[in-house]
Image (cartoon, grey):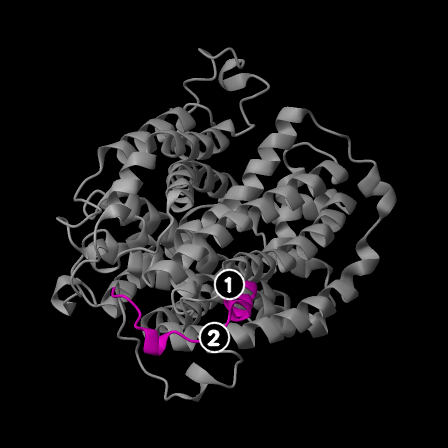
Amino acid sequence: MTDSPDRGSGSRQLQVETHGLDVIGDAERKGTPRTLFWPWFGANVSILGLSYGSFALGFGISFWQALAAGVIGIVFSFLLCGFVAVAGKRGSAPTMVLSRAAYGVRGNRLPSVVSWMLTVGWETVLTALATMATATVLDRLGWGGGTGTKVVALIVVGALVVVGGVMGFDLIMRLQTVITVVTGVLTVVYIGLVADHIHWSAVSAVPSGSAQEFIGALVFMMTGFGLGWVNAAADYSRYLPRDSSGRGVVGWTTFGASVAPLLLLVFGLLLAGSSTTLNTAIAADPIGALTTILPTWFLIPFAAVAVLGLVGGAVLDIYSSGLALLAAGLRVPRYLAALLDGVLMIAGSIYIVFLTDDFLGQFIGFLTTLGVPVAAWCGVMLADLALRRRDYDEADLFRPRGRYGDVEPLPLVLTLAATAIGWGLVTNTAAGWLEWQGYLLGPLGLGGKDGSWAYANLGVLAALALGFLGTLALGRGRVRTQEAGPPSRPLDVREVPGA
């Protein structure tokens, strides 16, 4: 990590990153917390943030309710990322290796698999959206837009994402710096060009919704933003020096990740609230629909900003998904794990682009369903981190017989119980494969699957709270026992699969 785009990694010859799950040595730990701004801003400056305005209003709430839900959901969820990122500089290893301190070396494979599924899902969604946006722009220009265009666009976008993920940290940091500047400037231009499509009289006339609908939008914002990143939050802070400010890590992670989505959300709410037609179109093609209000001459720059923003997020996802796959037990080099995830990403993108016409329903179902176990893991991870007074013993993170153990029953039971309760408190009728969820809404007196609480997505909040409070209450003794032992012997590289 570097102090600026022109120093450190930027001055080294670009090559495939050799680090996998292994601990980052002190000689390679560089930079300051403010350098975290670049990857987090670049990954979240996507034009997709504008579409979240439409998604929020889709819960049946007013502009002001949607704005409040968005601000609280975005900032709070990325604050969770900031706290998890502190573990990176304290343990020098990827996020899903650090959580072995809570779950045990092999017990951690379960949350690693869930983390892998989430990141692969996100990189697939972002790649598919970039493909559809490119096809829509070319169609408006009269240069194609059919199946052939989509195939070419998918190949180009997929190649960019896979190359970034395979090359690793240095290329990602350089790429995110470029994406930050280019997309930031072009997004401002886009806002200026379509500002006259905002009609405050229509926006202010959107009726208010219930408290349950507000909570549903709030939870959706959390799962769509920070809770989609918590399982990767330490993957970049692990390159910082050990004496880096913890407050700085939290602050720059939260600020870098939140600032663009907040600005985009406000403008997206104003656009969606001004036009029922645009609001409806976004549900089918969240990025492409935004081109319908643009002058023709700006379509190519718009395609660039849309694709670059989505690629920026997908590159971080594929990098972290490869690390999560290694943490789940796959014994291959990191770049091969990223390449495998790239193949799955392309296959999933083909399904979204060519075989389904209900993007929004499936997207919400995906976020909510995986958001529950990830929230449970996040609660366990944050409480475990809060209980620790010493840095991690990095060598024992790789030893089943070390201080962190092989399989720790308490965190696993908490995670499974919180997930079971959480899934019983969420519903999604738009995705038929999720109709089994919501089984606790009736027994708990919340009106059943058709009641007023059915779409509040309380399960995500319940899973987060249960994981956090359960670990705080029951895990203190285990952490104190772990920290009481003497430092372990140095780590042999042969003890680190995928190093």
Residue 484 in view, yes or no: yes
Q: Residues within 10 Å of mark 1 (few under 14, many from 20)?
A: some
Please rate how many residues cluster around mark 2, counting C-alpha atoms within 10 Å: few if below 14, some from 14 to 19, many from 20: some
- Residue placed at 17% from the left, 64% from the top? 332
Residue 44 higher or lower than 351, as above or below:
below
Q: Is residue 142 visible?
A: no
Tell me the SS state at disc 1. Answer: loop
Q: Give the quadrant of residue 493.
A: bottom left
Question: What's the residue at 27%, 32% (across, down)?
Answer: 410
**Residue stretch in magenta:** 22-42
Left/right placement of residue 472 relative to residue 329 reads right
Q: Residue 240: within the magenta? A: no
Q: Which residue is mark 2?
A: 31
In the rendered image, the vertical position of residue 464 relative to residue 212, given as above or below: below
What secondary structure characterizes most of the magenta part?
Answer: helix
Q: Are marks 2 and 1 in contact (CB under 8 Å)?
A: no
Q: Nearer the viewer, mark 2 or mark 1?
A: 1
What label does residue 245 carry, if any?
1
In the rendered structure, which amino acid carries the disc numbered 1? Answer: Ser
Q: Nearer the viewer, residue 43 or 59?
A: 43
